Image (cartoon, helix red, strand yellow):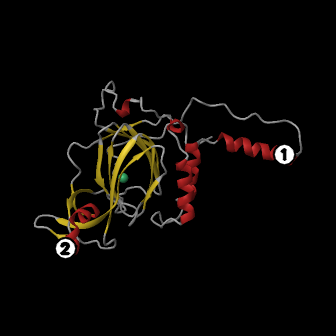
Amino acid sequence: MRIGNDELKLKPVTFEGGSGGGVGGGVGGNKSRRRKKTRQHKKQKKTAVRTLFLACEDVFSTDDPETPLSPDKVAKIRSRLDVMKPEDLNLSPSLPYFGNPIHETHTNSAVTYIHLFESDHFSIGIFCLPAGSVIPLHNHPRMTVFSKLLFGSMHIKSYDWTVADDSKPHLEAPRSPLRLAKVKTNAVFTAPCDTSILYPTTGGNMHCFTAMTPCAVIDVLGPPYSDYEGRHCAYYNPFPYIPAEVNNNKEKSVDEYALLQEIEKPDGFSVHGAIYNGPSIFHD
Ligand SMILES: [Fe+2]
């Protein structure tokens, strides 16, 4: 989903609190033991979000940010996200972004985006959804996206194009082009659950989120949206599609396919920006 610079002009904020708590270094022993203890000390001090950021810097460091990720690179990001918890990011359902009406700039259905980082190669951010809020169906052109549900329950419906490399509409409607897509996911996810990953042409590249309860999702996009690079966020309306060849099983076909019509950004859908208040991604 597009979080454009015009909508969000936020910079990462370093976290001033919560320091300390490190493991005390021992004294004595030989040099190698001291080095090992120092390495362990540094390793233990790294926060989950710092570790994720370093993994992203490593994985997304190729010259062409649209280069498909190898399985080991995918696994590297996934492993960092799989273990991430709300407290690693200073998040909790009691924050105003999740439907608490005392926050005057947020309605109960507004979605909040907490920006952590963006470069030409990847971005990291957190979507905060009050119960009942919706992030409408949208795409991720030529992008790989890692999404980790931190808390709450969320219905996700996702699609992939049936003809992935077809830039033209699959079918023509009287007014607007429609293109055939196959449902990839149509289920409710409840945290804690594994990281979900979508790819440029598979994994459910177009998806819609509906918050069943207040929930938070951390997203890693590689590369980020870029109008300049042709990675524009499009929104869609789904329409039922019943293939003629499976007309004898209409229920199944309706569940498995849809015709997607590109639309303007839906009226009433807006995303508020919020300042990140968790541990710094830039230092231990
Ligand atoms: Fe998305």
Secondary structure beneath dot 1 equals helix
The circle drawn on residue 33 is 1
At label 2, counting other C-alpha atoms closer than 10 Å, the crowd grade (few under 14, some 14-19, many 20 or more) is few
- In the image, what residue occupies the spot 40% across and 62% down? 203
At label 1, counting other C-alpha atoms closer than 10 Å, the crowd grade (few under 14, some 14-19, many 20 or more) is few
Q: How far apart are marks 1 and 2 (CA)?
A: 71 Å
Furthest residue toward front:
248
Residue occupied by mark 2: 244
- Picture coordinates of residue 239 (x, y %)? 19, 60
Furthest residue toward top:
102
Please report whichever mark, 1 or 2, sits nearer to the chain's N-terminal start.
Answer: 1
Ligand 1 neighbours mark 2 (CB distance < 8 Å): no
The circle drawn on residue 166 is none
- Picture coordinates of residue 99 (x, y %)? 33, 31
- Picture coordinates of residue 59 (x, y %)? 55, 59
Secondary structure beneath dot 2 equals helix
- In the image, what residue occupies the spot 33% across and 73% down? 165
Q: Is residue 45 visible?
A: yes
30 versus 184 height, above or below: above
Q: Left or right of 35: which side holds 265?
A: left
216 versus 78 height, above or below: above
Q: Are marks 1 and 2 in contact (CB under 8 Å)?
A: no
**Kind of residue at badge 2:** Ala
